[in-house]
């Protein structure tokens, strides 16, 4: 314990520019309803400034929202890689690719100085994941301090951090447009449904994010320390499938269902075949599943993701004064 | 009811339907597995297994053009078909040929249609009659055999020709509705529950057909009274509130005047303004947002069911004359009215509506 504390104390304080321009995006997937209604409500309230913060609210995929589907041609939230953002547009270009390029103009350009300071993208999942923040970097101190702030303030749901280890050019989701960005993922909620309890959790997370940003901008010093419940993506596991039809031949086992982030040990059940057999986890390392039985991932050949659990150390952070 | 045993024809031909809504996956996988194993003929019973809406199943959507499970009214089944006719109407007429025709002696004896709901409804049998003794005895049998999940019976008071769902095609019919399960997702425990429900139902039919008598008694039934829509924006028609956290997941818990019903997106609580306490169900069913239904409300009552057994060999030859049958029905009705029941609806006949309109 003393070694770790010393490590934290040894981290040099960091100062970063004020986060003045924040974007809040909902309806990136048109049937993930908390974000749709939260953004609409903020637009109804005409909320454009929150203290020192200029807030841009966006319904990312209006066509998909209109028909209450995840997407119309292809998944918008896979269209933000450098490659897709810079690809030429023809009549054959899917709607979501065009829209991604529009959003890149509005909130980016990705990687440039004009980009939004912070992009926060709102999502729901059918998996029992409570409140999860998802991001690409284990050294983005703004995001990690926001995470710690939310974790301390929110008691109505478990709060966790999921790390996707990808370089910026390959980062495919909308939150990668901003200088800093993360997704807020809240579940479980069926797609197409809005649950008040889930909506309230998401609203609280957004409020606490804006609260932290305003404190940061006004000069508050945030002490360094450790953040736990950080999960780094390792690999995905697909359902057992029929080799001819590719249809799934099993469901998530009842002992795994709803147990996102609980450790999966070698020998633990993963799937219950429709024919009755149990398929067990045969990995050697204890890993932590998440996105367990996410509806939209059946077509992506993902039954769940597996992650390593870790703790990160963050430095003291304060806004950079000119 | 005591001493009065009702003799009914055997339930020899049963249809089991899944994928009537293509994203309600318990029924889809149950039907797929049965079709793979080619389970059909067993002792005392023949079971036809049907994937009702294969196109919707293929796309994992509720429907492609129109809700198949609203296409079984007499009007829709007898309407003309052109190249503009929606797929689901063409399909409902196909299913009517296969499992019906609705209202005729050739129809399946029993049609059981498998559904899921995002609402926390446990296992519900849903039917149009509260005096179809076959359905009600199956209900009581399931309630006694299945201890892990609440089992309930929901009655929609509609005459046969207005009955719009697939189960109305058979001489007897009901939907098995199990929730909560997100559409497009298969939960192992929900699938197991549906498998058990189907198994127990078929077991009851086997026992009934082999001559087992089933004693009468009383069962609780929920009769649909009305639907309640979400509050909506006057211009856009978008919803402005969600089901209140204190009502969410509380299907079949009594809703009293002034209980919270909705929470607006700006944080306000809206209360139940009705005067009669009623039982809510289909609370926050995903597919009902577009139908203008946030929840449905029902009255609960106790229904007496007579003892029943199946016709024996030779009993068919001794069919009562229609005059004798009518006299017997009048006697049963009289007994039921003595016990407080208000109508008898025989298969194929029109009936007076109960107080409490369905709309």
Image (cartoon, rainbow, N blue to C red):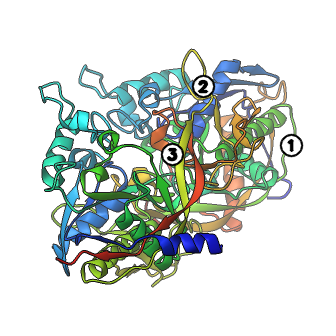
Dot 2 corresponds to which residue? A241
Q: CA distance from mark 2 to mark 3?
A: 17 Å
Residue B253 in sight from this viewpoint: no
**In the image, what residue occupies the spot 86% across and 43% down?**
B213
Quadrant where the C terminus of chain A is found in the figure? bottom left
Residue A302 drawn above or below residue B345: above
Pointer 2 and pointer 3 on the same chain: yes
Question: Horizontal and vertical percent for residue A19?
Answer: 23, 70
Q: Is B211 on the left-hand or right-hand side of B107?
A: right
Point out residue A98 in the picture as x, y percentages from the top left corner: 17, 38
Q: Nearer the viewer, residue B56 or B94?
A: B56
Q: How many marks?
A: 3
Residue at the (43%, 75%) spot, across then down: A149
Q: Is residue A121 above or below residue B313?
A: below
Residue at 30% x, 78% y is A216
Q: Report the residue marked by disc 1.
A: B213
């Amino acid at each position: 314990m003393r070694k770790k504390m010393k490590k934290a104390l040894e981290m040099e304080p960091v100062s970063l520019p004020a986060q003045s321009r924040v974007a809040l995006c909902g309806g990136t997937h048109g049937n993930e309803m908390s974000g749709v209604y939260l953004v609409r409500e903020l637009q109804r309230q005409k909320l454009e400034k929150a203290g020192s913060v200029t807030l841009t609210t966006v319904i990312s995929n209006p066509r998909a929202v209109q028909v209450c589907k995840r997407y119309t041609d292809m998944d918008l939230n896979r269209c933000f890689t450098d490659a897709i953002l810079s690809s030429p547009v023809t009549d054959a270009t899917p709607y979501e690719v065009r829209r991604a390029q529009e959003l890149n103009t509005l909130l980016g350009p990705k990687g440039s100085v004009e980009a939004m300071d912070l992009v926060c993208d709102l999502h729901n999942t059918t998996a029992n994941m409570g409140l999860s923040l998802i991001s690409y970097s284990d050294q983005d101190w703004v995001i990690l301090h926001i995470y710690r702030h939310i974790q301390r303030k929110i008691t109505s749901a478990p709060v966790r951090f999921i790390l996707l280890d990808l370089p910026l050019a390959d980062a495919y989701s909308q939150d990668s447009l901003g200088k800093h960005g993360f997704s807020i993922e809240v579940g479980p909620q069926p797609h197409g449904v809005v649950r008040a309890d889930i909506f309230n959790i998401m609203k609280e997370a957004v409020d606490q994010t804006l609260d932290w940003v305003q404190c940061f901008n006004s000069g508050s010093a945030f002490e360094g320390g450790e953040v736990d419940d950080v999960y780094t993506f390792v690999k995905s596991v697909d359902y057992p499938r029929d080799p001819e039809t590719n249809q799934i031949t099993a469901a998530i086992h009842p002992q795994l269902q709803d147990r996102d982030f609980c450790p999966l040990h070698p020998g633990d059940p993963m799937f219950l075949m429709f024919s009755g057999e149990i398929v067990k986890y045969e990995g050697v390392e204890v890993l932590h599943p998440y996105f367990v039985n996410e509806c939209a991932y059946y077509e992506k050949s993902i039954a769940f993701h597996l992650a390593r659990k870790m703790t990160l150390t963050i430095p003291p952070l304060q806004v950079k004064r000119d | 009811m005591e001493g009065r045993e009702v003799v009914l024809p055997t339930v020899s031909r049963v249809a089991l339907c899944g994928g009537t809504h293509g994203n309600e996956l318990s029924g889809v996988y149950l039907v797929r597995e049965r079709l793979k194993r080619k389970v059909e003929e067993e002792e005392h019973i023949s079971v036809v297994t049907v994937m009702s809406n294969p196109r919707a199943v293929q796309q994992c959507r509720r429907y492609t053009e129109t809700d198949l499970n609203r296409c079984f009214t007499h009007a829709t089944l007898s309407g003309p078909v052109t190249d503009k006719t929606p797929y689901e109407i063409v399909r409902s007429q196909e299913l009517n040929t296969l499992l019906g025709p609705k209202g005729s002696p050739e129809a399946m004896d029993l049609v059981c249609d498998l559904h899921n709901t995002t609402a926390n409804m446990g296992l519900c049998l849903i039917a149009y009659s509260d005096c179809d003794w076959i359905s009600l005895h199956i209900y009581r049998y399931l309630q006694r055999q299945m201890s892990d999940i609440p089992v309930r019976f929901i009655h929609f008071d509609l005459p046969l020709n207005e009955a719009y769902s697939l189960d109305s095609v058979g001489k007897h019919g009901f939907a098995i509705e199990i929730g909560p399960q997100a559409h497009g997702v298969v939960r192992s425990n929900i699938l197991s529950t549906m498998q058990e429900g189907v198994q127990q139902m078929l077991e009851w039919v086997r026992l009934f057909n082999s001559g087992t008598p089933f004693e009468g008694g009383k069962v609780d039934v929920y009769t649909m009274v009305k639907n309640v829509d979400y509050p909506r924006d006057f211009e856009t028609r978008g919803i402005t509130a969600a089901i209140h956290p204190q009502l969410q997941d509380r299907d079949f818990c009594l809703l009293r005047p002034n209980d919270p019903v909705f929470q607006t997106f700006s944080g306000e609580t809206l209360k139940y303004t009705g005067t009669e306490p009623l039982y809510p169900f289909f609370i926050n069913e995903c597919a009902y947002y577009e139908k203008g239904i946030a929840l449905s409300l029902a009255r609960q009552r106790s229904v007496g069911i007579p003892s029943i057994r199946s016709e024996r060999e030779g009993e068919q030859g001794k069919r009562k004359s229609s005059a004798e049958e009518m006299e017997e029905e009048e006697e049963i009705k009289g007994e039921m009215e003595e016990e407080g029941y208000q109508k008898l609806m025989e298969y194929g006949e029109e009936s007076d509506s109960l107080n409490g309109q369905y709309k």
